[in-house]
């Protein structure tokens, strides 16, 4: 795909350029979770709230621009061709993972909830309140809308020449990353960059560049629309949202609260099987999760590592599998938190083979390094895959010719904030990522403990 990004941004004068072109323009796991919610919790009411974890401001554009885009998203419906794709396509080696009744509801009855948007003290406040089925999809739409509006506001400051420089620098930066991954044996990298992308068109450009240059090393995209459009694998399983909701529903009893993290998985495996059984154990702390996990969880396909040091989390999982008599080489870990090319290369080496004594992660700079026997010892410890997000689809750091950092990515999230009027909480393996009222966070920590947690700066 050849896109003149500079010319398009410079000539941008149409009344509304929609960010959300399709309701399929979301992460695939949102669709999997939507079916789960529709099936098990169709009457549960929740609230989602958008949070900015960065020091950088979000409100570089007018709130009217935001509400225009939100209203446009609310007016969208799933197209018949999209529903047919969901019904007939093969996902994770299986057809028919979406039930006919769910797809009928999705096409006929699905609607996004209303929203509340305001400006207080110069800051945007955005929330979504309603049935869980009507609010959950706002997570990705709201984040991609805000990030792209922020991008557009920064683009308006640049001349056409400045825009040329910006995108030339960004393309060179992207190519340098791709070049370092080319030829790395047994590589598995997926695009996880929808929520904090620079723009829809840039994400599409990145995905096509990855697919064209990494071959089988690029295993697909989390973006369902791009997977559909470009005949790629749609990648994704589940997120923190479900354990947060089930914990809030069980919060009145300490025993039920602690057990809720496993009840999530019981319900999930009633709904999905095989490769879709990927756990996300860090919602209330990974270490306590495995210390108390039922035996049957060892039969799951693997885990996604989010807020813990992926080297530590991977080793922890491997040790736990061995204690439970499972062969780690048959299992899968997916790292997905703030990854960049150095992290991907280092983790791939560490888990797909082994690092020779004295060799550091940053010593791996190219595919040739992996084939140098002084540094590379074959022998898989566990299957490894990387979900590459913000620093794949929005790494414009140092590309802005004006040098003011207006294109640098920010850590913007949309999370469940309340469930049936009860506060929702996420502890995380990183203290900096804990969410919820302070009193509730302390209460949850008294129930789940704080083993294995640390305090790490949030990058993206």
Image (spheres, rainbow, N blue to C red):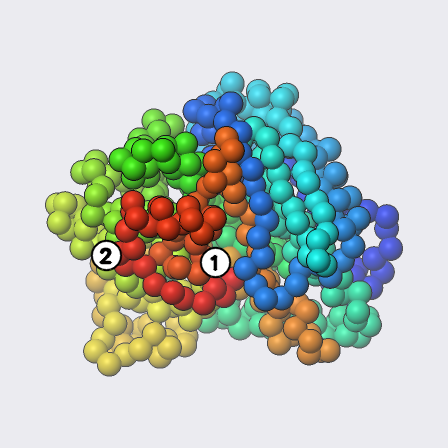
Check the image and report above or below for 44 versus 319: above
The residue carrying mark 1 is 388
Q: Position of residue 55 (x, y in %)?
A: 59, 66
Q: Position of residue 158 (x, y in %)?
A: 79, 71
Looking at the picture, tell me which residue is in the foreground, 42 or 98. 42
Say whether residue 336 is visible: no
Q: Quadrant of residue 173?
A: bottom right
Say whether residue 394 is visible: yes
Identify the residue shown where x is 80% and y is 75%. 161
Looking at the picture, tell me which residue is in the foreground, 245 or 406. 245
Identify the residue shown where x is 51% and y is 33%. 421
Q: Residues within 10 Å of mark 2 (few under 14, many from 20)?
A: some
Identify the residue shown where x is 57% and y is 53%. 51
Looking at the picture, tell me which residue is in the foreground, 102 or 308. 308
CA distance separating discs 1 and 2: 22 Å
Q: Position of residue 389 (x, y in %)?
A: 51, 57
Whichever of labels 1 and 2 marks the residue nearer the N terminus, that label is 2
Please state if 380 lies on the left or on the right of 77 as rendered.
left
Element marked by disc 2: helix
Q: Position of residue 375 (x, y in %)?
A: 27, 77
Query: Quadrant where the N terminus lies?
Result: bottom right
The residue carrying mark 2 is 316
């Amino acid at each position: 795909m050849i896109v003149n990004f500079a010319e398009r941004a410079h000539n941008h004068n149409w009344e509304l350029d929609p960010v959300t072109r399709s309701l399929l323009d979301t992460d695939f796991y949102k669709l999997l979770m939507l079916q789960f919610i529709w099936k098990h919790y169709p009457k549960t009411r929740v609230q989602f709230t958008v949070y900015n974890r960065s020091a950088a401001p979000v409100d570089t554009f007018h709130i009217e621009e935001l509400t225009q885009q939100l209203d446009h998203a609310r007016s969208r419906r799933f197209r018949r061709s999209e529903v047919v794709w969901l019904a007939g396509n093969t996902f994770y080696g299986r057809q028919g993972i979406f039930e006919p009744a769910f797809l009928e509801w999705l096409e006929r009855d699905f609607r996004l909830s209303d929203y509340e948007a305001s400006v207080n003290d110069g800051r945007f406040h955005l929330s979504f309140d309603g049935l869980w089925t009507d609010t959950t999809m706002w997570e990705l739409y709201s984040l991609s809308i805000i990030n792209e509006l922020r991008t557009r506001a920064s683009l308006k400051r640049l001349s056409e020449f400045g825009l040329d420089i910006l995108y030339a620098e960004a393309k060179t930066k992207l190519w340098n990353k791709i070049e370092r991954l080319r030829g790395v044996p047994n590589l598995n990298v997926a695009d996880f960059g929808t929520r904090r992308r620079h723009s829809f068109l840039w994400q599409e450009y990145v995905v096509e560049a990855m697919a064209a240059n990494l071959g089988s090393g690029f295993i697909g995209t989390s973006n369902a629309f791009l997977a559909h459009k470009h005949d790629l694998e749609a990648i994704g399983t589940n997120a923190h949202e479900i354990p947060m909701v089930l914990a809030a529903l069980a919060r009145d009893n300490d025993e039920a609260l602690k057990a809720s993290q496993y009840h999530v998985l019981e319900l999930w495996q009633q709904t999905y099987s095989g490769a879709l059984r990927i756990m996300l154990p860090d919602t209330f702390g990974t270490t306590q999760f495995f210390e108390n996990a039922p035996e049957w969880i060892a039969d799951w396909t693997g885990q996604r590592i989010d807020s813990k040091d992926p080297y530590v989390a991977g080793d922890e999982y491997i040790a736990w599998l061995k204690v439970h008599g499972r062969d780690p080489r048959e299992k899968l870990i997916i790292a997905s938190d703030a990854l960049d090319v150095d992290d991907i290369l280092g983790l791939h080496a560490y888990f797909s083979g082994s690092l020779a004594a004295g060799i550091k992660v940053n010593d791996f700079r190219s595919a040739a390094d992996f084939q140098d026997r002084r540094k590379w010892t074959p022998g898989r410890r566990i299957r490894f895959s990387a979900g590459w997000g913000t620093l794949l689809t929005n790494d414009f750091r140092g590309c802005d010719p004006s040098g003011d950092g207006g294109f640098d990515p920010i850590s913007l999230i949309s999370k469940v904030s309340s469930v049936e009027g009860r506060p929702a909480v996420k502890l995380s393996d990183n203290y900096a990522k804990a969410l919820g009222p302070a009193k509730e966070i302390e209460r949850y920590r008294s129930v789940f403990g704080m083993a294995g947690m640390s305090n790490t700066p949030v990058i993206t």
